[in-house]
Amino acid sequence: MAQSLRQRVDGLDDRVGQRIREVREAQHMPQGHIVEVLGRIFGVVWHQTTVTKTESGARPLRLSEAVAVAHILGVPLTDLIDETAASTASRGRHAAIRELRLMRSQVDKRITELQES
């Protein structure tokens, strides 16, 4: 039993970092967005290199940071800890978020075009 727990804990930082990168990239979210929102909303000072190191597993996450990053990504914390914990509903939410971000980008672009004409 203890060995099973040990196996689950070993490499956790690497797996969580990898999941952050997977979820972030699936949403076409730049690393800078995580940095910006962490600072503006959560008062956490990160740099793009911090995101890179975290995603590679070279820098472990504090629990408060993990909760904040999960919020920014729009996923439950459990989705970052264990890929198999990611529910179908959560995946559907990811798709909806991606679609809404794309639509927002298109609307923003159109607004800019109209303002410039």
Image: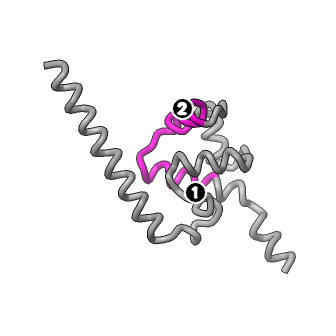
Q: Main SS type for the magenta part?
A: helix
Percent x, y of residue 41: 57, 35
Q: Which residues are magenta?
A: 17-41
Residue 60 visible to an observer of this rendering: no
Looking at marks 2 and 1 on the same chain, the residue that comes earlier in the sequence is marked by 1
**Label 2, label 1: how many angstroms apart (C-alpha)?**
20 Å
Residue 39: % across, % down: 60, 31
Q: Nearer the viewer, residue 6 or 56?
A: 6
Scheme of image coloration: one colour
- Where residue 54 sits in the image (x, y, percent)? 66, 45
In the rendered image, which residue does mark 1 sit on?
19
- Say which residue appears at 80% left-offset and 76% top-offset: 4
Q: Estimate how packed mark 2 is, as few (under 14), some (14 to 19) or many (20 or more) residues with alpha carbons within 10 Å.
A: some
Name the image quarter holding residue 77.
bottom right
Q: Quadrant of residue 12?
A: bottom right
What amino acid is at disc 2?
Answer: Glu
In the picture, measured across the screen, residue 40 lies left or right of residue 13, that is left
Q: Which mark is residue 10?
A: none
Residue 102 at least partly seen: yes
> Against 49, is 21 above or below?
below
Q: What residue is pinned by disc 2?
A: 36
Placement of the N terminus among the 4 image quadrants: bottom right
Q: Is residue 92 magenta?
A: no
Horizontal side, residue 35 vs residue 102: left or right:
right
Residue 49 position (above or below residue 90): above
